[in-house]
Image (cartoon, coloured by chain):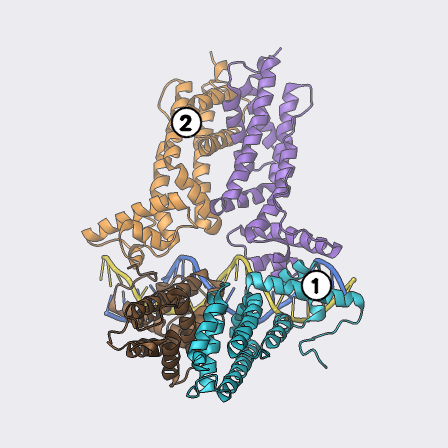
Chain colours: A purple, B orange, C cyan, D brown, E yellow, F blue
Amino acid sequence: MTTAAADREPLTDRGRRTREAVLSSARSVFEHQGYGATRMGDIASAAGVAHGTVYTYFDTKESVLAAVVQQVIEDLLHALHASSAADPLERISDANHRYLTAYSEHARLLQVVEEASFAERQFEEILEQLRATHVQRVAAAIAKLQREDAASADLDPQATAAALCAMVEGFARHWPNPDANNTLTTLWARALGLSEKE
Amino acid sequence: MTTAAADREPLTDRGRRTREAVLSSARSVFEHQGYGATRMGDIASAAGVAHGTVYTYFDTKESVLAAVVQQVIEDLLHALHASSAADPLERISDANHRYLTAYSEHARLLQVVEEASFAERQFEEILEQLRATHVQRVAAAIAKLQREDAASADLDPQATAAALCAMVEGFARHWPNPDANNTLTTLWARALGLSEKE
Amino acid sequence: MTTAAADREPLTDRGRRTREAVLSSARSVFEHQGYGATRMGDIASAAGVAHGTVYTYFDTKESVLAAVVQQVIEDLLHALHASSAADPLERISDANHRYLTAYSEHARLLQVVEEASFAERQFEEILEQLRATHVQRVAAAIAKLQREDAASADLDPQATAAALCAMVEGFARHWPNPDANNTLTTLWARALGLSEKE
Amino acid sequence: MTTAAADREPLTDRGRRTREAVLSSARSVFEHQGYGATRMGDIASAAGVAHGTVYTYFDTKESVLAAVVQQVIEDLLHALHASSAADPLERISDANHRYLTAYSEHARLLQVVEEASFAERQFEEILEQLRATHVQRVAAAIAKLQREDAASADLDPQATAAALCAMVEGFARHWPNPDANNTLTTLWARALGLSEKE
DNA sequence: CATGAATGAGTCTTCATTCAT
DNA sequence: TATGAATGAAGACTCATTCAT
């Protein structure tokens, strides 16, 4: 609802192009060097602009990352929408697949955000928010499965969701492999007792 | 010969005490401020020694953290020993309990190590090594359960272990709660199909 | 030919209006923020024009202030004309009144000029010139009073004028109050020995 | 009562010497170049120390000036003590002489402080305080003269003091000449109506 | 061993001015 | 004329590390 990374919007096309170039270069440089090791000059060079030009659109290094992150977060939140599949198993597989895909694409940047979160509280909150959202959605999905008698009723949706989300995130972060989805879906299904149904 | 992060071993008793003080203060300061925000002077002040004294025992800031980390890693590796309980469920509960306990105790420092890992490759390797060890042990445990027919045979021990370890680590990091063990043990048991046995 | 600080004269009506707007905004901004703290962009914003437009009419920040100052100096010099009153006391009161009034009106800007005089020699000279003129006029007035036997003959007009001018300026700068004129006139009259007359 | 310019006190003799060198060089550089035009590096070079050494004792450029100023203000306040002479005229001459002497010695630095006062409020307050103190002391002296019937009773001590102090300060600032004291004393005496006595 | 002073490379950020459109 | 984007030199301040005592 609010564009947190407003800084200074370009008014012309040329400006728009420059800002995009800076943003895109920034993402690339951040991913390669991390937050702390990235110099504002690196970003400028990568974008092919002068040192000071970065400050035409962004106030600080922090706000450059914030702008980069905004897009990523939007993408991830988008990937978190519940699946509309009828079959419970498929729903889970679907959701995990979408999240794993999105997460993998942004994995390196998310790590950078985590690094930055030590220096700037803002990013800690962003990550917390993202995780909380993920857990909420999964908890809701579990509750729904329970109402449908498709998942074990004795599981606490909230705690279970937290654990399963941790698994997905951790898996995506440290063991990125193409088969991840199968493994995860199987484990989720078993953990939730999906096999009990019907 | 034994201590890898020794830098410069103290020769006198007084030296030994000073080094300990520095190390202990360092851990505390790192935990409170993070790696990047910690100044060598902060560590010195906290230890009640002069600025330069830290360099009597450690070559760099990095090596101070390395020395602090060493103890933590040893403790965590120790916690990873397989349980000797006879009951499979108990074995899992036992192992997770020990790891969660150890992890919680060192959670903040491990975060700091993660932060430092962006600046100093050394720490990235340490964390990777720790995770790999964790996964290996869990994979071995799963394989053993499978041989005992206590766990579903169709699970890939390696992949499953990776996912479950990710769950434990993520859970310990972001949702530290006292009931964690119950939740985790239940989910592990279901995921592994322990209930199928007998 | 007449305006010394012209930089670039506007050729069109629109230009004339823009230049006036910039000049007027500049004065206001300088008065509020001082010379050093004023950014060219602040002036542009206040005038409702683009950043670069200021440079259409002025070469440098310094020359903007110079243009602003010019008007002020003219006004002050105008206020320095000797009074035409017949009564000596009235002449003094009159002159001081006019100067104090003019000074008060421009007090803040004169302070700004003083600030700028540290960075740009030009303004130091302007202030010196203004003071010198003031002293000359007062010295002449004193000499005239002496010739009329209305002021003590043993006073050195030059030195006395310098001291009295310092008093007026200092008073106007640091203790601006509506009663200033009375106090000053009384002191001047006594100092000059006006009461001795008749 | 409080040492406002504490920053970081040296603990050793060597440190004490370095701090003094920096302070003394700083004063000299400030006087020559003004506040705004002085670079921290200029101060360091002048003191023969490395760039960073200045920061061993002072937090900011501002605090360097504050430390320099402190000594000056103390000296000036010291010069403001009332004269103990019996003769009223002598008392005035005495006091003015002392103040003019002290002021002249520090005139350039006081100008620099005035310059800095535009950027840093702290210095504005220091100058205001100094002026207020001066006025208070002079007002008290005038009141005393009035009680002794040595000065005209119809003068408002406060307003008169303000005007006379302005005269002294302005005179000292802009027309530093060796004869200043005679001129000022004469004018003060006449203005105060000292001649009326006896 | 311990101290604390000294070093100086490194970085972010500012902003007057220039320039393409 | 007017615009607003681009430039890049400049400077304050930090802090890990070294060194003289």
Residue corresponding to mark 1? C21
Q: In this image, B74 relative to B133: left or right?
A: left
Query: Which residue appears at 56% of the width and 42% of the height?
Result: A110
Circles 2 and 1: CB atoms closer than 8 Å: no
Residue corresponding to mark 2? B96
Q: In this image, A143 relative to B67: left or right?
A: right
Amino acid type, label 2:
Asn
In the rendered image, residue C165, in percent from the top left (x then y), is placed at 48, 77
In the rendered image, residue D130, in percent from the top left (x then y), is placed at 37, 66
Query: Which residue appears at 55% of the width and 19% of the height?
Result: A192
Question: Badge 1: how crowded within 10 Å, few (<14), some, or many (20+)?
Answer: some
Question: Among all residues in the image, which is located at the extreme front?
Answer: C198
Question: Badge 2: how crowded within 10 Å, few (<14), some, or many (20+)?
Answer: many
Amino acid type, label 1:
Ala
Q: Chain of mark 2?
A: B
**Residue D143 disc label:** none
The quadrant of the image that shows the C terminus of chain D is: bottom left
Q: In this image, C88 relative to C74: left or right?
A: left
Q: Secondary structure at mark 1?
A: helix
Q: Nearer the viewer, residue D22 or C59?
A: C59
In the rendered image, residue D191, in percent from the top left (x then y), is placed at 40, 75
Question: Among all residues in the image, which is located at the extreme right?
Answer: C12
In the image, is residue A33 above or below residue C37? above
Query: Which residue appears at 46% of the width and 37% of the height?
Result: B132
Q: Same chain, marks 2 and 1? A: no
Distance in Å between CA atoms under marks 2 and 1: 74 Å
In the image, is residue E21 above or below residue A63? below
